[in-house]
Image: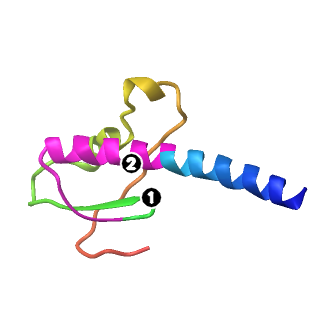
C-alpha cells in the first residue's frame, strides 16, 4: 500500500506543478509581449529589468496573473516589488 499511496501523491503533485508552471509561462509571455525584459525566473518568481519610466508594478502584477481561458476562476494573485537590486 505505501507504494500506491506514494504513487498517487506523486501523480497529483506532478499535475499541480505542471499546471502552475503553465500559468507562470503564460504570465511571462504576456510580460514579454508588453515589453518587459525578463532576466530570470526562480520557482514562482519573475525578475525583469526596465528603464526608468517604463511600465509600473500594478501592470506587471496584472499581466503576470492574467489567466488563460482554460484557467478562468483559478485563484491566482501576483505581488511584487520594485528595487534596483534583487532581494528576498
The colour scheme of the drawn protein is: rainbow
Q: CA distance from mark 2 to mark 1?
A: 7 Å
**Quadrant (top left, top right, bottom left, bottom right) of the C terminus:** bottom left
The kind of secondary structure element at disc 1 is loop
- Per the rendered image, the range of residues in magenta is 19-41
Q: Nearer the viewer, residue 72 or 18?
A: 18
Q: Position of residue 76 (x, y in %)?
A: 49, 39
Q: Which residue in the protein does label 2 denote?
A: 24
Q: Position of residue 38 (x, y in %)?
A: 21, 59
**Lateral position of residue 86 relative to residue 1, left or right:** left
What residue lies at 82% left-to-right and 53% top-to-bottom?
A: 4
What residue lies at 50% left-to-right and 43% top-to-bottom?
A: 19
**Lateral position of residue 34 relative to residue 82, left or right:** left
Q: Nearer the viewer, residue 53 or 24?
A: 24
**Dot 2 and dot 1 residues touching (CB under 8 Å):** yes
Q: Residues within 10 Å of mark 2 (few under 14, many from 20)?
A: many
Residue 69 painted magenta? no
Q: Nearer the viewer, residue 43 or 10?
A: 10
**Quadrant (top left, top right, bottom left, bottom right) of the N terminus:** bottom right
The kind of secondary structure element at disc 2 is helix
Q: Which residue in the protein does label 1 denote?
A: 44
Image vertical order of residue 78 relative to residue 74, above or below: below
What residue lies at 39% left-to-right and 23% top-to-bottom?
A: 69
Amino acid at each position: 500500500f505505501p507504494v500506491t499511496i506514494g504513487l498517487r501523491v506523486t501523480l497529483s503533485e506532478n499535475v499541480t506543478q505542471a499546471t502552475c508552471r503553465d500559468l507562470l509561462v503564460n504570465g511571462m509571455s504576456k510580460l514579454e509581449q508588453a515589453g518587459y525584459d525578463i532576466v530570470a525566473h526562480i520557482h514562482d518568481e519573475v525578475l525583469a529589468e526596465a528603464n526608468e519610466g517604463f511600465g509600473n508594478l500594478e501592470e506587471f502584477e496584472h499581466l503576470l496573473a492574467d489567466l488563460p481561458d482554460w484557467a478562468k476562476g483559478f485563484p491566482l494573485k501576483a505581488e511584487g516589488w520594485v528595487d534596483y537590486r534583487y532581494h528576498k
